[in-house]
């Protein structure tokens, strides 16, 4: 059985209201201010949710309490005037609040774009599995790379506003770990968060026909091996169509990471593209999750069958 594509959110347009939430770690106040200004320059009306700048009373890794972070996400998704939910930052904590969201109350509502990556992988998986909605694995507006790199900002903006011009994602440095082309529905995100989801409500039993997107940061090669082993033992690699490997920033020299990737993925008999340029890198590409695409590992390209946003 092959994965089916998910419902695509609509593209954004000038004047759209977008919610800014902090489901994981806190952002510096000046980072939030700058992020809001960038969104305004794009013609959007950012709506800062009530707890977006909160600090947890004792757990400094968290942007406020689990209940408040979940309430902000819930309110943003339920509000019909909100066109997209923009996560201010990743970090840590989405896995603590995800079960506090009333997902049943959100089912059947008009799809809206969820934008973020890293720790937000937990929410990407929840939105896919519980709501059946495709989402945007893209840079968050308080991230230093987003603020400093015009190419990173522009690829996200074009994906959101002009998706017809973002159907083909071309990696500058991408090359084949194993060559070939593959077609399937995109799935994935941050490796550590995908591995942490095994056995939870976001556990996937079948990734048949999927194109798996994986990236990571600040993990030693043996830890990357452990996470990939966890996914392999959980059946994640059974029947997948192809793999696109993003960045492995601050994971040690790539020549030490690459043998792990080759050992775990090179023998699957599917195309695997490496150094594709998404994740914790500069510049960073925006990738869609939950849509049909064709991966060409030799050319270093991923082309969606349809516009990533409708």
Image (spheres, rainbow, N blue to C red):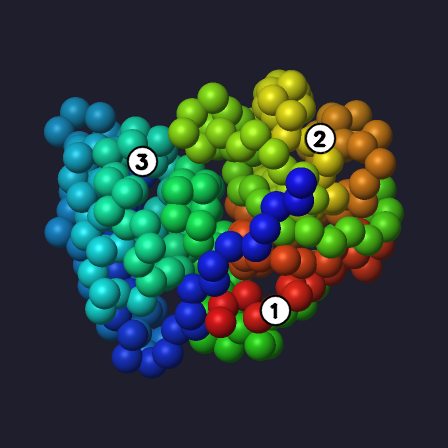
Q: Which residue is rendered at x = 71% and y = 30% of the image?
A: 238
Q: Residues within 10 Å of mark 2 (few under 14, many from 20)?
A: some
Of circles 1 and 3, which is in front? Answer: 1
Frontmost residue, 112 versus 157 = 112
Frontmost residue, 88 versus 238 = 238
Q: To which residue does mark 3 refer?
A: 98
Q: To which residue does mark 2 refer?
A: 238
Residue 149: horizontal and vertical position, in percent?
50, 63
Whichever of labels 1 and 3 marks the residue nearer the N terminus, that label is 3
In this image, 266 relative to 89: left or right? right
Is there any visible trace of residue 85 in the rendered image? no
Q: To which residue does mark 1 refer?
A: 306
Whichever of labels 2 and 3 marks the residue nearer the N terminus, that label is 3
Q: Disc number at residue 203?
A: none
What's the distance in space between the residues labelled 1 and 2, CA to CA?
A: 26 Å
Residue 306: horizontal and vertical position, in percent?
61, 69
- Decide: marks 1, 2 in contact (CB < 8 A)? no
Q: Which residue is rendered at x = 66% and y = 66% of the image?
A: 305
């Amino acid at each position: 059985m092959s994965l089916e594509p998910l419902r695509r959110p609509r593209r954004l347009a000038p004047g759209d209201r977008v919610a800014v939430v902090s489901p994981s770690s806190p952002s510096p106040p000046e980072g939030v201010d700058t992020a809001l200004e960038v969104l305004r320059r794009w013609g959007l009306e950012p709506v800062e949710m009530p707890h977006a700048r909160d600090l947890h009373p004792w757990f400094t890794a968290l942007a406020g309490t689990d209940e408040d972070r979940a309430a902000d996400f819930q309110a943003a998704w339920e509000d019909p005037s909100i066109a997209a939910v923009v996560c201010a930052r990743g970090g840590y904590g989405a896995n603590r609040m995800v079960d506090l969201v009333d997902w049943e109350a959100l089912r059947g509502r008009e799809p809206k774009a969820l934008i973020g990556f890293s720790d937000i992988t937990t929410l990407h998986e929840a939105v896919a599995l519980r709501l059946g909605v495709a989402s945007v694995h893209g840079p968050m507006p308080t991230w230093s790379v987003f603020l400093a790199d015009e190419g990173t900002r522009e690829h996200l903006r074009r994906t959101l506003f002009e998706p017809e011009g973002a159907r083909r994602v071309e990696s500058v440095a991408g090359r084949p770990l194993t060559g070939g082309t593959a077609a399937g529905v995109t799935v994935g995100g941050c490796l550590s968060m995908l591995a942490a989801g095994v056995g939870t409500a976001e556990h996937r039993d079948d990734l048949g026909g999927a194109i798996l997107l994986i990236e990571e940061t600040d993990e030693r090669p043996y830890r990357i091996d452990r996470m990939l082993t966890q996914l392999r033992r959980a059946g994640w690699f059974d029947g997948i169509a192809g793999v696109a490997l993003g960045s492995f920033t601050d994971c040690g020299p790539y020549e030490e990471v690459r043998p792990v990737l080759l050992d775990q993925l090179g023998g699957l008999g599917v195309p695997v593209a490496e150094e594709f340029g998404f994740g914790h890198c500069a510049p960073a590409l925006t990738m869609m999750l939950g849509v049909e695409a064709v991966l060409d590992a030799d050319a270093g390209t991923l082309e969606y069958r349809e516009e990533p946003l409708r």
